[in-house]
Image (spheres, rainbow, N blue to C red):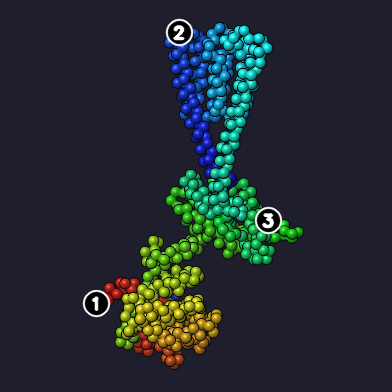
Amino acid sequence: MNVGHAQKKAAEQGVSDRARLIALCAGCLGLFINFFVCGVYVMSGAANALVFGEVAIYAVILATITVCAFRRYRIKQSFTIGLLGLFLVFWVGTFLEAATGQTAPFDFPLVLFIPLFLVIILQHQALFATAPVQAVCVYYYTCEFAILDIGPDWLPADQNAYALMMAAFSGFSFCALGIVAFARERADQKMVELIAEKDTLASTDGLTGLLNRRAFMDELQRLWGEQKTVRIAFVDLDHFKPLNDQYGHSVGDQILKKVANRISSVSYVAAAARLGGDEFAVVLKDDIASETVDGVLSRLHQTIVSDIRWDSGLITIGASIGYAEGETMGQSLSGLLRSADTAMRRAKGSRSDWARFNPRIDNEALATSTLEVELKSAIKNGQIKAAIQPIADAKTRKVVAHELLTRWTDSGFERDPSPKDFIPIAEKMGLLNEILWVTLDEALAHLDLREQKLAINVSPAQLLASDFLETLLSVLARHDVSPRAITIEITEEVAFRNVERNVAILEEARRLGMSIALDDFGTGYSSLSMLDTLPLDKLKIDQSFVRKSDQSAQSKSILLAAIRLAKQLGLESCVEGIETQKFAARVAVLGADHIQGYWLGRPQLVKDAQREFQIAS
Ligand code: C2E
Ligand code: MG
Ligand code: MG
């Protein structure tokens, strides 16, 4: 795996594009000059077989350079070999012309400068290699032929010194160009490296040198477009936090680095990233046969978990791996990632080394993790709405209150999630109060609570928030609603932990005028002792009692006992889940104070309930 490889390639591509342009221009210009000079020779009547031969060879070489550059075929090689060929052909031709007495007065400056132009754009190695050839050729040419042009009266010693001087001048000019070319090549290389380094820094995890999350997602996106199947493994270290606490952060960092090196060393890994903390992700090579994936995952796990020697002791590393593979047709990249994550959690939960995503087992967990991701933005985007369900007097059937319930609307899922699915998740994420303030605010804006009450569901964790009562009062005050209009529905879990504090808050709420109802009475394990502990005004008898009351006389007696118990304790009773008129009549006869259920009215979004109310009135 080569971090920043793509960026380096792009920078190199830029340099090679420039070389191609130079080769193309040089080839075309060379061809033009070649045929132009040939034309001059023909028109001046100086053309002969040698000239035509030279022109033909030049044309073939220049055309080869041009075509190779145009077709991007071995541009550098064809350019270098072609120009060196031109250089040699030039000298052979020049010596042949001179030997056959075809020198012209302007030939001498040409032998100094034409070779120079031919090699000027070559790399430094070629320039340094041709410098002595040029010097020797100039020396011989000057001695043998040019002196004749310049002046036959020169003394042989002067002639030799002059030829040497010319040779040295020409050779050194080649060397000077070589040095310039060397400097230019270094600058190019440095630029390529700098670009690669800059992009590498932006795309790698500073600690481990693996890809960072963003670069990993880019890489996945690229593979998603290129491969038929993408194979992902999620790696999460076990108990890394205690290790970090025990040995200190610098040791923690060393462990992460070591693990990163180990992951990279596994031959089937095509790309690896540290996603954050002790979480890594790996893309496996796509040429692995499906049946060997298990072996690869085992090897990956074994490689990661071997002990690390530290200060003459051994640190044991644990890891859980989740694997998911996806046909890129018809699946989403983020879905695949979540699947691997879900499988990893299952592996961790079952203390397995690794687990493959299995839709039959993991879909529920996957749905939960999807809801977790979406819920936060749902609250922010106003998809969480208030719904109300009426609660009526059991005898007169007059609506005396509403229960505030939450609905997730326009969720974008096939079916909007039910509160039974997302309320436990919101509780786990500590979002219930946020949801309560949003829905309560919406409900209070629409409801008239002078005659009727509003019941709100409050879980123990909500109650424990330090500003719970304060915020509740401020929301009520904003809508000019008295605390007397509010009933807090709690479940008996309130009495499981932090009992004293919970009781104190509930008592404070009561002192402010609110009522407290125990929700879903009869479904818990220690209902009776709760009645003693909690400050209550009302029992909401769970809907299962009503349903069962139809099945046996015994169940009916239990329902009656629950209603009587409330009465004897001086509490109001409300029976939930009244779905038919028969049940409504039955619980009224049994002495219940209030009823709630689909028969009376299903929960409705506050805005819809309000519209109905307006139409009715
Ligand atoms: P709950 O507080 O016992 O609310 C009554 C639940 O029973 C509601 O379900 C309501 O739709 C359902 N229900 C009412 N009448 C009938 C009936 O006649 N037949 C049947 N089969 N069901 C009936 P929902 O709205 O799905 O809420 C489920 C639970 O989620 C609630 O039970 C409550 O514990 C919790 N919940 C809902 N909204 C909130 C909220 O905003 N905050 C908190 N903390 N909990 C909430
Ligand atoms: Mg309730
Ligand atoms: Mg209930």
Rendered location of residue 141, percent (x, y): 61, 13
Q: Which residue is mark 3?
A: 306
Reading the chain from its start, which is encountered first: label 3 or label 1? 3
Could you say which quadrant of the image residue 546 lies in?
A: bottom left
* Placement of 34 over or under 242, stated as above or below: above
Q: Which residue is mark 2?
A: 45
**Residues at badges 3 and 1 in contact (C-beta under 8 Å)?**
no
Rendered location of residue 512, percent (x, y): 43, 86
Task: Give amino acid for label 1.
Answer: Ala
Rendered location of residue 75, percent (x, y): 52, 29
Q: Which residue is mark 1?
A: 616
Visible in this render: residue 243? no
Could you say which quadrant of the image residue 607 lies in?
A: bottom left
**Camera-side residue of 2 and 8:** 8
| CA neighbours of label 3 inside 10 A, class few (<14), some (14 to 19), many (20+) | some
- Identify the element where label 1 is drawn: helix
**Residues at badges 3 and 2 in contact (C-beta under 8 Å)?**
no
Reading the chain from its start, which is encountered first: label 1 or label 2? 2
- Identify the element where label 3 is drawn: loop
Visible in this render: residue 508? yes
**Camera-side residue of 372 and 128:** 128
